[in-house]
Image (cartoon, helix red, strand yellow):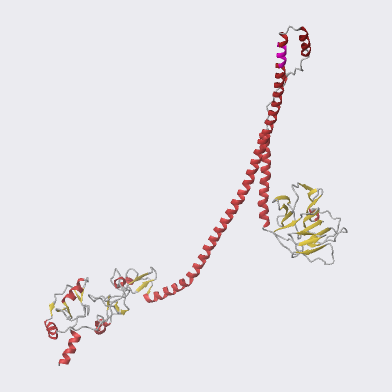
Amino acid sequence: MASANTSWSEENLSCTICLDVFNSPVTTPCGHNFCRTCINHFWDEKLEYKCPLCNELFHTRPDLRVNILLSEMVDRFGTPVRVKEQPCVEPGEVPCDVCTGTQLKAVKSCLVCLISYCQTHLEPHQRVTVLKKHPLVEPIDRLEDRMCEKHDRILELFCKKEQVCVCLLCTVTDHKSHPVVPLKEEYEVKTAQLGKIEAEVPQRIQERKLKIKEIKDTVELSKKDADKEIAEARQAFTALIGCVEKCLDDFNQMVKERLKSTEKQAEDLIKGLEQEVVDLTKRMSTVKQLLHTEDHLHFLKAFRSLKDPPPNRIWSTVAVRPPSYEGALERSLHQLEETLDMEMKKLRSGDELKKVQQYKVDVAMEPLPLSDPCYVLTGGRKRVKGVGKWNAYDNNLKQYSEIREDRNYLSLLARQGFTSGRSYFEVEVKGYTKWNLGVTTIPGSKSDHITFIPSHGYWILTYNMDGLVFSDDPAVRLPLRAELQKVGVFVDYDKGWVSFYDVGASVHIYSATGCTFSQPLYPSLSIQY
């Protein structure tokens, strides 16, 4: 019997709230026993009065009475009996809602009771038949958030139309006729959608990073372009300011020279007048002395020297004319206007040249016969060495006509022609006494009797002792400001333009417009050593 009593006391003398030996045990109306302090503290924290073990709801707070038999049993054994230790709640874990004092870790949550239980307080749900029917899930914090605020029922469905969680009563009231599915089913759908989003997001992030880089590169390029434009503008305006300052200096110099000439004329006249004043003063002194002499002989000898006075210049007709500046400022401003206009044209030509240079082409030259002693090709077939000196070209040319008998005349032609779009090439002509360059539609002609004009398929710029000429009917004579060193040729096949530029001076030389091209245009060059 003693063994049986000891067994009974170990299982039944502990409060299921504090897990310690009963202290002033009291009994609830449902027959369960708790420490008076534990059950009162438990109810003080709840809005409803339920039994912590069986969850029986009491409409009013029960009037607890001491369990005399249980008190005597506690006094009889007198030794504290503790339930096997259970783990306390750690940060991030769900605590037991029933434990008082030290809260233990919840092992399950009841979706009916909406309470999380530790292993000890879960025991009634595993033993009592009614409680066994309650659905248990893994511990969930804030179970009250899972309740429908309107119907006080658990949220277990999902309305696909309004995309909200609903309870069972919602489906027959506010969400009647709406398509609803269990939360788990919608969870699986949404999880699949998140999977797609998870796969798409890195790609979208990468796209945006690339776009950020593109924008930053654009800004950086814009800064470089801005710096370049500012530098070019500073250079252009410095040149224009230099022209204005030079014009002002020239005007000031002209005014000063005229003033200096006037001052020199006045100085010479003043010297002449001062000398005459000196001479006349001396004559007056001599006259006064003679008037007071009584020596007849001396008087007559001295008078002889006075009777022929020095030439008397008519000074009334002599005058210093102030320099005239009338029209000088207007002429200076007109000259400045012409200079600025010329500089503006040069600047515009420079901008135009930069634009056309982006269409620069490069076509390799045809190999030339090694037996020809007049010239050889070097530098990747882009240079011609002839008659003992080097001549470099930036375009790619090939021979198309015979070498003249004097062995100092060479005609070259590009292997590849232009058939559309825009093209640009440059030819270095420095050191040649005669040259013809441009484009032609006649790549194989060797006749010396063809006139190189546009109507015959030639758009040629010619340089010789007569100057610079565009070959046309009639010929167009062009101004030559300085010796040309490199000539640029721009072709707009579709618009029918052929333009020539002085590359060194960045100046536009001439443009043939309104042309009609129906055949390929080949760069052409003839040079005289």
Q: Nearer the viewer, residue 436 or 55?
A: 436
**Residue drawn at 68 percent across, 56 percent down:** 357
Coordinates of residue 288 in the picture (x, y in percent): 70, 11
**Residue drawn at 15 percent across, 92 percent down:** 2
Coordinates of residue 18 in the picture (x, y in percent): 21, 78
Q: Nearer the viewer, residue 126 or 437?
A: 437
Q: Nearer the viewer, residue 417 or 243?
A: 243
Coordinates of residue 417 in the picture (x, y in percent): 75, 61
Coordinates of residue 313 in the picture (x, y in percent): 75, 19
**Residue drawn at 60 percent across, 48 percent down:** 234
Q: Which residues are magenta?
A: 282-288
Q: Quadrant of the N terminus?
A: bottom left
Name of the residue lying farthest toward the right: 405
165 sits left or right of 459 in the view: left
**Residue drawn at 79 percent across, 52 percent down:** 462
Question: Residue 130, can we see it?
Answer: no
Chief secondary structure of the magenta span?
helix
